[in-house]
Image (cartoon, helix red, strand yellow):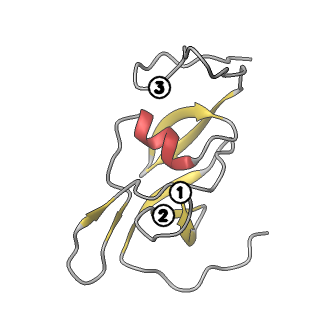
Amino acid sequence: METKLSDNTRIEDHPILDFPARRVVTFTWEGQELRGYEGEPIAAALHAAGIKVLHTSHKSNRPRGFFCAIGNCSSCLVVVDGVPNVRACTEKLREGMRVERQVGTGPAPRARE
């Protein structure tokens, strides 16, 4: 079981905080295979992979990304496994997730099965 990613965009050593070992999982962004830590927010995994634009606004087609990080805004809406309007900042990463950029606001989310 792999527990360490080799990117340099994550804080791994901190003088006060501890970062317990986590399982590395594979997921896709726009069809591109990426890796992140199981249970971390999708937005954190994408940000660490260098992906900053997660969503585009409906009216002006402006790029949106990781903003409030607490699920209050709609800047990080993505489509996860075909379900639109998922907040990437609060949704936990799982093995095999298919994550896609959402253009505008999608239809109301369907219940996940």
Residue at (58%, 85%) from the top-left corner? 108
| Residue drawn at the location 51% of the way across and 39% of the way down | 45
Residue 9: x, y in percent? 40, 25
Label 2 – label 3 distance at C-alpha: 22 Å
Q: Is residue 113 above or below residue 36?
A: below
Residue 35 position, x and y percent, is 54, 32
The quarter of the picture where residue 53 lies is bottom left
Instruction: Residue at the far front: name it.
Output: 16
Residue at image mark 2: 78
Under tag 2, what secondary structure?
Answer: strand
Please tell me which of labels 1 and 2 falls first in the chain.
2
Q: Identity of the amino acid at label 1? A: Ala
Q: Nearer the viewer, mark 1 or mark 2?
A: 1
The residue at 67%/18% (across/down) is 3
On the image, the x and y values in percent for residue 14 come to 55, 17
Give the mark, 3 or 1, whose residue is nearer the N terminus.
Answer: 3
Q: Quarter holding the N terminus?
A: top right
Q: Nearer the viewer, residue 21 or 24?
A: 21
Q: Disc 3 vs disc 1: Cβ atoms closer than 8 Å?
A: no
* Closest to the observer, 99 or 46: 46
* Marked residue nearer the N-terminal end (2 or 3): 3
Q: Are marks 2 and 3 in contact (CB under 8 Å)?
A: no
Please name the amino acid that badge 2 sits on: Val
Relative horizontal placement of residue 38, taking residue 27 as reference (left or right): right
Q: Residues within 10 Å of mark 2 (few under 14, many from 20)?
A: many
Disc 1 designates what residue? 88
Whether 9 is drawn above or below 76: the answer is above
Q: Which residue is mark 3?
A: 10
Q: Nearer the viewer, residue 68 or 78?
A: 68
Q: Quadrant of residue 81?
A: bottom right
Tell me whether the residue at label 1 lies in contact with that at label 2, contact meaning CB atoms closer than 8 angstroms.
yes
Q: Residues within 10 Å of mark 1 (few under 14, many from 20)?
A: many
